[in-house]
Amino acid sequence: MLTQTSDPTGVLLGCGVDAEAIDRFETIPASERAWHLVFTEAELAHCHALPRPALGLCAAFCCKESLCKALPTPYNFTDCELYLDPFRGAQDLVISASILHDFGIERVTARIDGPHNGEMIAAVFTFGGRPT
C-alpha cells in the first residue's frame, strides 16, 4: 500500500522506494555485520527490543535506502534514524539538521508496507520550500 500524497504547503523534492527481504536481516552472520555503518546505537537498541528485531532493522534500512534514492547525492546512513512502530504505516524519520539544511528539506514522510511474503517495502517523500 504505497500512497501518494499532495501537500499544498510544500514542494515535492524527491521520492524514493526500496524493498528488502526481512529474513536477510536475520541470517547475516554476526561476523559480517557492520551495523555501525548503517544504524546508530539507539536504533540498534530499539530494534533489538522489538519482538522481531529483523523487522525493525529491515524497515530502518528500507527507509534509509529510500531516502538515499530521493536525494540527489548519497548521505551517511547514520544521519537518518527510524524507530519502527509496527502498528503504524506512517513512520517518523529522525534526520540530521545538516541533511535537512543541505537539501532544503522541510518535511519527510515515510510509508512502510509489509511484511508481505517476507518483504518490507518503504517509500520516502521529501518536501521543501513553498509553492510559487
Image (cartoon, rainbow, N blue to C red):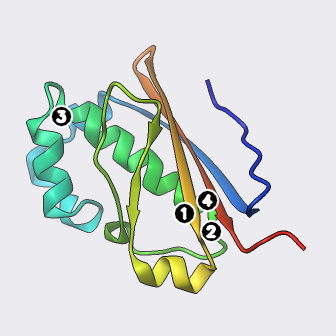
Which comes before the other along the chain, label 2 or label 3? 3
Residue type beneath disc 3: Pro
Relative to 51, say whether 72 is above or below: below
Label 2 with label 1: CB-CB less than 8 Å = yes
User: Residue, x 18% and y 34% (percent of image)?
Assistant: 53
Q: Residue furthest right?
A: 132
Label 2 with label 4: CB-CB less than 8 Å = yes
User: Residue, x 19% and y 65% (percent of image)?
Assistant: 36
What secondary structure is marked by label 3?
A: helix
Q: How crowded is mark 3: few (under 14 residues within 10 Å), some or many (20 or more)?
A: some
Residue type beneath disc 2: Leu
- Cα distance between the residues tagged 2 and 4: 6 Å
Q: Which mark is residue 53?
A: 3
User: Residue, x 52% and y 46% (percent of image)?
Assistant: 110
Which comes before the other along the chain, label 3 or label 1? 3
Label 4 with label 1: CB-CB less than 8 Å = yes
Quadrant placement of the C terminus: bottom right
71 vs 46, left or right, is right
Q: How crowded is mark 1: few (under 14 residues within 10 Å), some or many (20 or more)?
A: many
What secondary structure is marked by label 1?
A: helix
Residue type beneath disc 1: Cys
**Residue 77 x %, y %:** 37, 67
What residue is disc 2 on?
A: 71
What residue is disc 1 on?
A: 68
